[in-house]
Image (cartoon, rainbow, N blue to C red):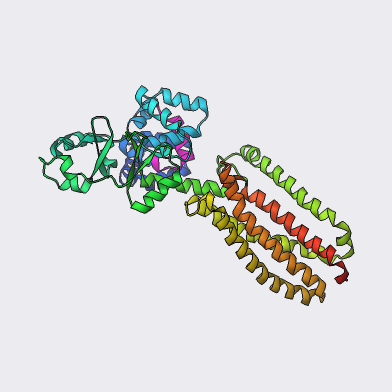
């Protein structure tokens, strides 16, 4: 019976191994469903190149947890072959002690490169680049380059060859297609073309994305101010980073930490969410204080209390629309901070005409409900004011935060909600107080 079980385990192990070899990225998705120790064991038993492809396909939080569990030998191989940009991002997610322990398992050169990458600010080209590059001399013949490429551990990642001078300054590019079709005795210089685009290590990620979109490149070289080749950014890795950031922005816009995951503990979620909930509570009290200023008016005309949520709700939705469009424009570099006036003017104009349309519809509904023309004037005029204020705040809040060097995703929605509630309540109740003679 034991022999049969051993045979079954061997067959299952062989099937798993073959599945990962043939479909590493698809197979990696299944590792979400097993505990981290078992996932680490499965990956550790794979050929190193297959293991790296599968490991790099994991979600960043899972890949970081497994990185901690890898043996020193596998960690050293990762540093030697894997995308160093990915490694640097994952190491930066760990506690300082864990990060130092993992770096200690690597060779001195690999650890030094990773520390250099981690020294770049987040969301810059330097943090995203892979330093595993193969730079060749233009005088080299194709046959000589093939001998260098064939045994190289990361040659399979290449979509083009970088040609540098004796000082490692980027000179030109050779496409892999031209290289593959060339005669063995041709020099790389004879195949080389001009460098379409490069980025500097301190360039923001938005600029990297803009150049990838403009020039339709598969990878782009990263250089220093003197033109020295530092690394490359590949489009596939960039897309993965953008997806991760997009989902994190969805969390931060509602006051959830970027570190929290669906599988995080309740205590972790509590610690990360509570501060923002307390801030939300404070802003809610500020809005309530505005309502309190008009307590007498509300007590006299109880219909106002029924309509308060209508004004706040509509202005909140309008502000959220303006906020989403502005934040997307900033993220994709469709707009710059210097264009704040143009963007604000557009949102004010949109808010005004939307306000008029909503005021007409809302006024008609209020008239049929209450029969009071005075109440119609109150809600219609306050609706226009609230919608204009919401559009203005939706445009200015993220731009202002960006100008101050802050992440617009973190606090924009909370500030916007505060503005729309306070302006909506104040305008509605203030106008009602002024026109109280028309109310009954």
In the displayed structure, 142 sits above or below 76; it is below
Displayed quadrant of residue 184: top left
Judge whether 2 appears above or below 372 on screen. above
By secondary structure, the bulk of the magenta-drawn segment is best described as helix
- Front residue (pair 295, 24): 295
Residue 63: say if magenta: yes
Q: Is residue 186 visible?
A: yes
Q: Position of residue 238 (x, y in %)?
A: 40, 45
- The spot of residue 16 in percent (x, y) is 35, 42
Name the quadrant of the N terminus: top left
Residue drawn at the location 80% of the way across and 53% of the way down: 290
Which image quarter holds the C terminus? bottom right
Residue 1 in sight here: no
Give the residue at x 14% y 46%: 182
In-front residue for pair 266/196: 196
Residue 434 falls in which quadrant of the image?
Answer: bottom right
- Horizontally, residue 94 falls left or right of residue 378, namely left
Bounds of the magenta span? 56-71
Q: In this rendering, would 194 be left or right of 304?
A: left
- Residue 342 is left or right of residue 118, and the answer is right
| Nearest the eye: 49 or 316 | 316
């Amino acid at each position: 019976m034991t022999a049969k079980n051993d045979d079954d385990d061997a067959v299952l192990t062989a099937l798993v191994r073959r599945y990962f070899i043939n479909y590493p990225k698809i197979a990696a998705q299944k590792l979400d469903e097993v505990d981290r120790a078992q996932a680490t064991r499965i990956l550790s038993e794979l050929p190193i190149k297959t293991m790296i492809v599968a490991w790099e396909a994991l979600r960043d939080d899972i890949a970081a947890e497994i990185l901690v569990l890898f043996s020193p030998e596998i960690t050293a191989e990762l540093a030697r072959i894997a995308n160093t940009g990915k490694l640097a991002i994952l190491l930066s997610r760990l506690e300082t002690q864990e990060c130092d322990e993992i770096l200690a398992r690597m060779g001195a050169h690999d650890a030094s490169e990773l520390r250099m990458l981690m020294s770049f600010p987040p969301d810059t080209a330097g943090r995203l680049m892979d330093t595993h590059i193969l730079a060749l001399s233009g005088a080299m013949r194709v046959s000589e380059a093939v001998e260098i490429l064939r045994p190289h551990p990361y040659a399979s990642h290449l979509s083009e060859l970088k040609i540098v001078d004796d000082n490692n300054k980027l000179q030109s590019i050779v496409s892999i297609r031209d290289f593959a079709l060339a005669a063995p005795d041709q020099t790389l210089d004879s195949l080389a073309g001009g460098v379409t685009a490069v980025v500097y290590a301190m360039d923001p990620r938005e600029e990297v994305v803009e150049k990838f979109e403009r020039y339709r490149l598969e990878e782009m070289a990263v250089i220093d101010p003197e033109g020295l080749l530092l690394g490359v950014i590949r489009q596939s890795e960039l897309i993965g980073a953008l997806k991760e950031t997009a989902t994190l922005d969805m969390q931060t816009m509602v006051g959830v930490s970027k570190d929290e995951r669906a599988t995080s503990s309740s205590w972790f979620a509590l610690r990360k969410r509570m501060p923002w909930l307390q801030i939300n509570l404070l802003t809610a009290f500020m809005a309530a204080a505005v309502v309190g200023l008009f307590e007498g008016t509300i007590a006299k005309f109880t219909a106002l209390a029924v309509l308060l949520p209508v004004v706040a709700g509509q202005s909140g939705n309008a502000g959220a629309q303006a906020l989403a469009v502005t934040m997307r424009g900033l993220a994709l570099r469709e707009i710059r901070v210097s264009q704040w006036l143009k963007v604000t003017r557009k949102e004010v104009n949109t808010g005004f005409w939307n306000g008029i349309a909503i005021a007409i519809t809302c006024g008609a509904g209020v008239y049929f409900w209450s029969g009071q023309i005075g109440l119609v004037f109150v809600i219609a005029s306050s609706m226009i004011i609230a919608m204009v204020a919401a559009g203005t705040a939706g445009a200015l809040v993220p731009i202002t935060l960006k100008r101050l060097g802050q992440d617009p995703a973190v606090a924009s929605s909370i500030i916007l909600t505060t503005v729309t509630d306070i302006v909506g309540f104040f305008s509605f109740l203030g106008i009602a107080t002024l026109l109280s003679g028309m109310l009954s």
